[in-house]
Amino acid sequence: MSKAADNDEKVIMPLPTWKIWYLMVVLYILYLLDFATRTVISPMFPILQKELGLTDTQLGWLSTIVLAMVGLLSLPLSYVIDRWRRGRMISLMSIVWSIASFCSGLAANFGQLISARAILGVGEASFNSGGQALLMASVKKSRRATLTGIWTTAAAVGTAIGMVIGGAVAIKYGWRTAFMAVAIPGIIFGILAWFIPDYKNQPKDANGQVGGMSTSFAGVIKDILKVKTLVTLFISFGLAYLFSMSIMYWLPTYFNRFMGMDVALAGTLTGAIMLTALVAGPVGGILGDRMSKNKPRNKVLLCWICIIICLVFFVAAVALNIWWLFFIVVFCQFAFIPVQHTASQEVVPFYQRATAYGAYIFSMFFFGGLWGPAVTGAISDASNLQIAFWVNGAILLIASIGYLIMYKTFDADYYSARKKEEGVEVQVV
């Protein structure tokens, strides 16, 4: 094993066991609530459409506006996270998004509702960047994808909770109560996030650099854009995320329109489907760690395999209108996500990881994820929702090509990042 590779086996932020558990629990619950507040609206589309007189395009924008704010602000806020306290930024953001969710339940018209959803997106803009950087710093390389796989199950659990609340609670107690129900826990855990452990990079040298690399915003972005694997990932995952966001937000409505399910059943079933991530995330993480033990680039190969399997079963599900095939589709989606998250962090040095992750989040929205729900809604208005689903499948096929390109560039970028980390120390705070 080379010196550069051995350097990546070091734990950047060594912590006592209880602090690791505190970090994991708080981040997990907040990640769960992040997605619950995003997706609680999805099963309520038919209710909101009837009560507020909204079109499918407007319904799509109620989801897209959240993604838009996350995408636009993730990069600058992630840079701030790398320079300030990650835990405290996470704390402030979670409180903001929770208040915005509560205010969504007070909206009287489309303008007020979309404004509240926009503020929710501001709060969620860089939570993932800070959380991922802290998790990567707390364990060795050989456990990172596995830990990330466990952490990302929170997205599925949160999505499931949001779907169930958005369906069952909205039917029984009203859609306003559903928005508020996912807001209060976020404030509580947001306060707890203020106290999670963090790390600081070593001081800058006389030239304003850390590890021989610039610490200015422009300098860090320039360094990130030199990494071929990241640039390809930015485009490919952006397209793949368009598919994911469209399916996540529109699947309950698809079940309602094409399979005759009522709102509560459609939301509950979609939530159950999203719970496949409880298995998919850890399985994908474990496979990613094992496959890349001697060949780091095998992480992106696993991502490509998952996408192709996902696409095959998606085509079958839509063509044959078989609802249970969506379990396999979503399983494959969640299986490669933790592997990809980890891969995106391993091709940059640890002191640029939150910023690199912010660029990753920005690009996955800019290159497609941002537009998914709204574009799907617009295509549905022009034709029907099933045609919109077919278009999403074609886009996912195009995205898969990028992962084959990354397979060729990953190892060189991985070992280059390890070399840049040599001699850089950190301080746990």
Image (cartoon, rainbow, N blue to C red):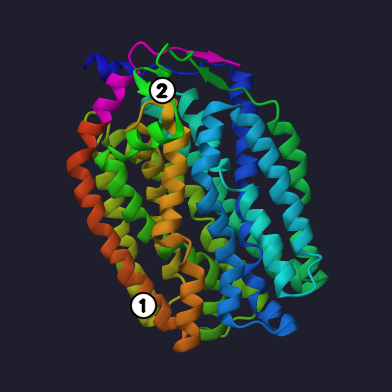
The residue lying furthest to the left in this view is: 408
Q: Which residue matches tag 2?
A: 140
* Residue under the point 61% across and 27% down: 85
**Which residue is nearer to you in this view: 271 or 39?**
39
Amino acid type at image mark 1: Trp
How far from the left and from the top, in percent, is residue 129?
51, 39
Q: Position of residue 367 (x, y in %)?
A: 39, 59
Instruction: Check disc 1 and report its element: helix, strand or loop.
Output: helix
Q: In the picture, which quadrant includes the N terminus?
A: top left
Vertical order, 146 against 300 (above or below): above
Q: Is residue 53 left or right of residue 155?
A: right
For residue 168, which quarter of the picture?
bottom right
Say which residue appears at 41% left-offset and 76% top-offset.
Answer: 389
Residue nearest the viewer, comparing 264 with 66 = 66
Observer able to see residue 295? no
CA–CA distance in space, label 2 to label 1:
41 Å
Asked whether 142 or 234 is in front, the reply is: 234
From the viewer's perspective, is residue 97 above or below residue 225? below
Q: Is residue 320 magenta?
A: no
Q: Name the spot of residue 36 as percent of width and height, x first.
A: 64, 55
Q: Quadrant of residue 338?
A: top left
Q: Amino acid at mark 2?
A: Lys
Residue plotted at (67% across, 61% down): 117
Please state the extent of the stretch shown in magenta in the rendering. 414-429
**Where 55 sits versus 9, above or below?**
below
- Judging by the rendered image, the residue that carries numbered circle 1 is 390
